Amino acid sequence: MTVLQTEKKHIVLSAVINPIVNRQKNHQRKVDLLQPLRQWIDALEIQNRKVAHFIAKLIPAQCPFERDIVLFGRIIAHIPPMCKLNPLYEQFIGLRFRALCYLVDQCGEDIQSYC
């Protein structure tokens, strides 16, 4: 522990004080239960043509839930893309991208049918 003397007050500096934690007293630590699953999906390597085709067909290129509701030729409502609410959205998109890259780079296939 170090004590600094100033003109009127003593300032105590301790090695156990963490200023970042002290500033965020009201915030609790967040536990990400999906982090192991995210890491597992990110670590998957595509090494099989059939698996790459399966992944490219299974994961859509764009959100299938986004819709315009049309009545008598006029748009009365819009349903926004809800895929980004999926906590694993970026991992699935990355997996699909890796599958498509495998098909192009390793298999020499044309992937226009998946776009």
Image (cartoon, helix red, strand yellow):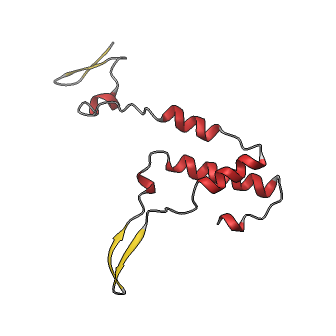
Relative to residue 106, is residue 66 depicted above or below?
Answer: below
Viewer-closest of 64 and 45: 64
79 lies left or right of 7? right
Q: Residue at the spot x=39%, y=74% of the render?
A: 68
Picture quadrant of residue 6: top left
On the rendered image, what quadrant is the C terminus found in? Answer: bottom right
72 lies left or right of 11? right
Tally the marks.
0
**Residue that extends furthest to the left in the rendered view of this protein:** 8
Picture quadrant of residue 112: bottom right
**Picture coordinates of residue 23 (x, y %)?**
27, 33
Q: Residue at the spot x=43%, y=66% of the render?
A: 66
**Residue that extends furthest to the top in the rendered view of this protein:** 1
On the rendered image, what quadrant is the N terminus found in? Answer: top left
Viewer-closest of 83 and 39: 83
**Picture coordinates of residue 36 (x, y %)?**
52, 31
78 lies left or right of 9? right
Q: Residue at the spot x=59%, y=35% of the render?
A: 40
**Picture coordinates of residue 57 (x, y %)?**
64, 56
**Picture coordinates of residue 102 (x, y %)?**
75, 52
Viewer-closest of 102 and 4: 102
**Residue that extends furthest to the front in the rendered view of this protein:** 72
